[in-house]
């Protein structure tokens, strides 16, 4: 699994890496329930934040799931699929937890499969 460095948008050539950005509208909340990521393209992806072992994060269908490390980097990402296949999702969550993920960020605003695949390409590092 590739890890991404958390960089500011003005970091020169490496600005091609996705990074987390704070959400001013959610700054007043006692707990961090929402966040946003800026993709390599500059597009912003709002996501709900769940602890890695919160099974609710795996119940969403047609979502983009981001496994996030304590250092605020994306360790892995995937689509949840149209039916939220429980066994496959649990295996993925266990794998990313072992790799150091502490949270699952769920992006629900991609309206179709093509949009979800585009978000995954934008948020993950180029191979």
Image (spheres, rainbow, N blue to C red):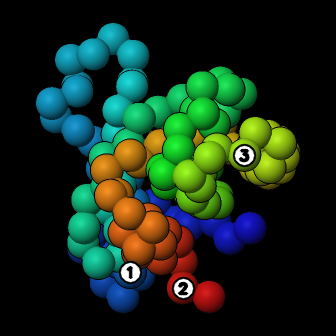
Residue 30 or residue 89, whichever sits in front: 89
Task: Residue 56 in the image: state x and y as whole percent.
Answer: 60, 25
Which residue is disc 2 drawn over?
126
Which residue is disc 1 drawn over?
16
Identify the residue shown where x is 54% and y is 29%. Answer: 50
- Tell me the CA gap for discs 1 and 3: 32 Å
In the displayed structure, does residue 60 sit left or right of residue 110?
Answer: right
Residue 126 to residue 95: above or below: below
Task: Residue 118 in the image: state x and y as whole percent.
Answer: 41, 75
The crowd level at tag 1 (other Cα within 10 Å; few <14, some 14-19, many 20+) is: many
Which residue is disc 3 drawn over?
85
Residue 92 or residue 81, whichever sits in front: 81
**Which part of the image, by quadrant, shows the N terminus?**
bottom right
Residue 54 to residue 43: above or below: above
Pair 1/3: label in front: 3
User: In the picture, residue 70 is in which quadrant?
Assistant: top right
Query: Could one spot residue 111 in this view of the protein?
Result: yes
Q: Earlier in the sequence, mark 1 or mark 3?
A: 1
Whether the residues at callouts 1 and 2 have beta carbons within 8 Å, the answer is yes
Task: Residue 127 in the image: state x and y as whole percent.
Answer: 62, 88
Pair 3/2: label in front: 3
């Amino acid at each position: 699994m590739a890890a991404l460095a958390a960089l500011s948008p003005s970091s020169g050539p490496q600005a091609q890496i996705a990074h987390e950005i704070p959400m001013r509208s959610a700054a007043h909340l006692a707990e961090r329930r929402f966040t946003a990521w800026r993709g390599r393209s500059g597009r912003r992806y709002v996501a709900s934040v769940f602890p890695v072992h919160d099974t609710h994060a795996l119940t969403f269908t047609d979502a983009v799931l981001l496994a996030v490390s304590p250092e605020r980097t994306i360790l892995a990402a995937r689509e949840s699929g149209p039916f939220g296949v429980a066994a496959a999702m649990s295996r993925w969550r266990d794998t990313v937890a072992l790799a150091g993920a502490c949270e699952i960020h769920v992006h629900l605003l991609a309206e179709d499969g093509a949009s979800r695949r585009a978000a995954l390409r934008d948020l993950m590092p180029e191979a």
